[in-house]
Amino acid sequence: MAEVVVGVIGGSGLYDIDGIQNLEEIHMDTPFGAPSDAFITGTLEGVRCVFVPRHGRGHRFLPTEVPYRANIWGLKKLGARHVISVSAVGSLREDIEPGHLVCPDQLLDRTRLRANTFFGEGLVAHVQFGNPMEEHLRKVLVESARAATDKTVHSGGTYVCIEGPTFSTRAESEQFRSWGCSVVGMTNLPEARLAREAELAYATLALSTDYDCWHQGHDEVSVESVLAVIKANVAAARAVVRETCLRLGALGQVEWPAHKALAGGIMTAPHLIPKATREKLDLLVGRYLEAL
């Protein structure tokens, strides 16, 4: 049976999990430039994990500057089929309190400045993205969060992704609330789009750190308040990652919709794809082009 490999994108300390073994640091370049940092691999609950700090160690990259394509390509290259995104978010709902965990099922894109696809340069492909989280993985993540922590876990909801790096204005925050959004963050797009193009199952474990700026009874969001909540909940995030790995390992090698997202999605006639583009994207589309 093929090895189960789980990618984890989040803070640089996430891999400091009790029970993790065989830690190794892997440096690589990609056709899309350098990733955020070295990848850290290890074995957890019998599952191989690949960690990448989204903003780099020491938090060096703005949300706009994160090399999303390189990070996702690197996870794919290292064998990941599942990706857990651990993300800090602001709450847009009264019932999602700071410290609560959220596993959203929808995304709303308010970014403007980010490369958001692997394709182009002579190769056109389209993937379905109506359900941006792989629902099977999202459910495993919800169950793991409820089993591994005493936190309140919210299942479902819309994550609105803003460009940043500034937090929302009050008008924006109220607009997002009027749209029915649950949380606001800065990093899940284009990350989730790219994961779908790479045929990786992707789901988010979002940590509510504040009430953004809409709540009259709470102070406006600040870096200090965000960091304080994150620090207090790092152990919970590690516990959820460990439990998720345990459950995915028990499931074995699954084939979920996200794992075949490109099937039938390549539009360009193979003989028209430039050689350089074919080589650049071989990791993603090679098996489909060979079959054509």
Image: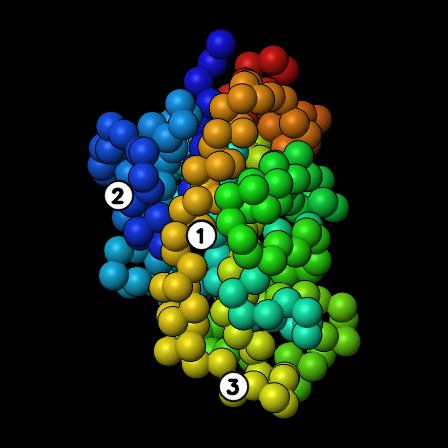
Mark 2 secondary-structure assignment: loop
- Which label sits in the foreground, 1 or 2? 1
Identity, as a three-letter code, of the amino acid under mark 1: Ala
Q: Is residue 226 above or below residue 245?
A: below
Residue corresponding to mark 2: 38
- Which label sits in the foreground, 1 or 3? 1
Q: Earlier in the sequence, mark 1 or mark 2?
A: 2
Residue at position x 24%, y 33% in the image: 23
Mark seen at residue 220: 3
Q: Earlier in the sequence, mark 1 or mark 3?
A: 3
Residue at position x 69%, y 60% in the image: 158
Q: Is residue 97 above or below residue 16?
A: below
Q: Quadrant of residue 153?
A: bottom right
Label 1, label 3: how far apart the Cα atoms are? 25 Å
Mark 1 secondary-structure assignment: helix
Label pair 1/3, CB-CB below 8 angstroms: no
Mark 3 secondary-structure assignment: loop
Residue at position x 59%, y 70% in the image: 97
Q: Quadrant of residue 216?
A: bottom right
Label 1, label 2: how far apart the Cα atoms are? 24 Å
Q: Is residue 198 above or below residue 162?
A: above
Residue at position x 31%, y 33% in the image: 20
Residue 109 appears in the rendering: no
Q: Nearer the viewer, residue 265 or 232?
A: 232
Identity, as a three-letter code, of the amino acid under mark 3: Glu
Label 2, label 3: how far apart the Cα atoms are? 35 Å
Residue corresponding to mark 1: 236
